[in-house]
Amino acid sequence: SAIEKLLIRGVRSFSPEDQPSVVHFFTPLTLICGHNGSGKTTIIECLKYATTGDMPPNSKGGAFVHDPKVAGETEVKAQVKLQFRSAGGQELLCVRSMQLTQKKGSAAFKTLETLLQTFDKTTGEKVSLTTRCADMDAEIPTYLGINRAILYNVIFCHQEESSWPLSEPSLLKKKFDEIFEATRYTKVLDNIKGLLKVQKQAIALDKQELAFLKENKDKAARVQNNYTSTSDKIQSFNARLEELDMDIKAVGRDLMLIVDRLNECAEQERKLADLDSKRSNLEKQAQGIEERMEQRDIQSRSDRVQALRKKLHLLEEGKRDRENARREIASYRESNTKLEKELRVSLEKKKTDDQLALHRIEDNMQFRYLEREVKIISRQHAELTSEFRRLDQRSYNQQNDQLRKKQNKLMEERAGLLGETKQLEERRNQLNRELEKDYENVEEKYRMQLIKVKTEQMADADLQKYAKALDDAIMKYHSIKMEEINRNIQELWVNTYQGNDIDTIKIRSDSDSRGNRTYNYRVIMVKDDTELDMRGRCSAGQKVLASLIIRLALADSFGVNCGILALDEPTTNLDRANIESLAQSLVTIIQHRRQQANFQLVVITHDEEFLGHIGRSEFADWYYRVEKDER
């Protein structure tokens, strides 16, 4: 970045009515010379005001604006315009306007227009970036690529404040903290600590929630296991019930077979009984016939014997009678008649006997038939008896009893299983309702909470790493910068200071006991390896030179993007030797940094001899002279 042009109107001794005063800044050196009170310092003040928005010291109440009483007006308007080039090469214009109104016994100061514009290179049009003063105070240092504290304390440091490096410790600490932006980084670290504290509290709460969800998840897992176990039992019981149903059906089929066999046995037994009855009847009939035949035989024989006996008796009588017939011829016919009668009786008897013989034949035939039937029935009876024995009714009865017992046992087991299955199903339904109501999506909730906790823990670890890295970076940055600053200070002091009482000076930074990111600063002078605090032990000239060298070193260390440095009366309180040495040192600095395109040194002085020392270099062909009009 670089400053190109400054316009001043109505500020301090610069008239609000005449043509505005314009200062063009050159690279690498701009020289401004003038007597005391001519308005040289006002240029520095306007540069600081334009870039930071800060008024000069002791300018409250409108002292920065041209006095209306001097102008003979009740109201004076002032304006400062600064045209500059940003670190990115962008052309910008800063406009700040003020107004001071003189009232009875007092003056009223008011900030008017504030404007930050850029130029479109293609169209040449002006584009307004911001009109808010607060925005512009923050934006311009950003465009210049430099810390606002560097602008205020180093680059455009006011003459009255130029000796701040040797001020009291609290002010010095404040200045360096602003330069190093320690407060900014401390706030960042404090914010990180705050975030870590909040994060830890959140993690603790989320861990409690996670523990609660884990407990719920474990409970849900146990409930789920119970549900699964119950379902498995129900499934096992249902399988057993199916087996029991199959066994019961099988036993039923076996029982039906046994019942059929028992029925068959009963039928066979009935048939045997029928055959026994029939055989008994036939045997009775046969026995009756046989008895009848025997009776008839006996009767017939008895009758025949009786008849024969009678006939024999009669024949014997007839023989006797025949013998006597001769003697009794009269009785022959009577005997003959009797014989005829006996013959007829004999014939009738014979007929009866023939009938009896026929009956005997018929009875014999019927007896033989009955005997055959009895044999047939006996054979059938034997077969049925054999079949009945083969059927083994007792075994079937035993099997029937066993199957009945088995069936009853299976039915009892089935009834018990049905009862247990019903209870298990009720338990399973209860577990399912519990899972759906109390533990719905508990696995997903636990997983999301676990992810949240792990993420927060990782974020917490990252924040801790970031805080440590930032802390280490701040420490390292501070250490590197301090080494660089002290190196530049030593080089400048050795090349500039012409006395022999001080070998070199340094800025010593001591860590605060409250934390290693807080430092206390002090400027020390070294003589023969002995270090002494410089504040209160140096002359006015040494104080001015030390402050100037420290500012030069700070500008060199922090001015990578903004190589501007304005020196207001740098030779104050310096003796001639040190003035010449300072001039030579400045020329050397210009020589070393001339390759830096954005390096700009603005020197404001009343010392023309000093100006001549610098002007004899190749870097300044002419200079500005500032004079105050008589009016």
Image: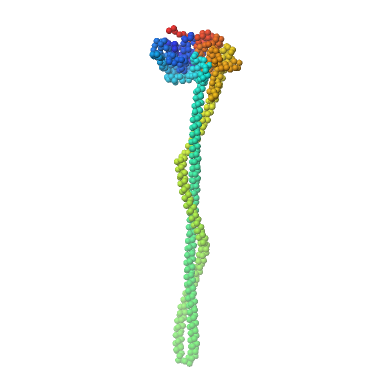
Task: Tell me residue 530's x, y (percent).
Answer: 60, 17
Q: Is residue 83 left or right of residue 525?
A: left
Q: Name, please, the residue furthest toward the right.
A: 528
Looking at the image, can residue 493 be seen? Answer: yes
- The quarter of the image holding the C terminus is top left
Rendered image coloring scheme? rainbow
Q: Is residue 310 above or below residue 558?
A: below
Name the foreground residue: 210 vs 72.
Answer: 72
Q: Which quadrant of the figure has residue 541?
A: top right
Looking at the image, can residue 373 be seen? Answer: no
Name the foreground residue: 304 vs 160.
Answer: 160
**In percent of the image, x 46 and y 42: which residue is there?**
434
**What is the number of callouts on the image?**
0
Task: Tell me residue 28's x, y (percent).
Answer: 51, 13
**In percent of the image, x 49 and y 83: which residue is there?**
306
Q: Which quadrant of the figure has residue 67?
A: top left
Task: Tell me residue 444's x, y (percent).
Answer: 48, 37
**In percent of the image, x 48 and y 91: which residue is there?**
324
Task: Tell me residue 259's x, y (percent).
Answer: 48, 59
Q: Name, please, the residue furthest toward the bottom.
A: 327
Name the foreground residue: 571 vs 257.
Answer: 571
Q: Is residue 324 above or below residue 356?
A: below
Q: Name, please, the residue furthest toward the top.
A: 630
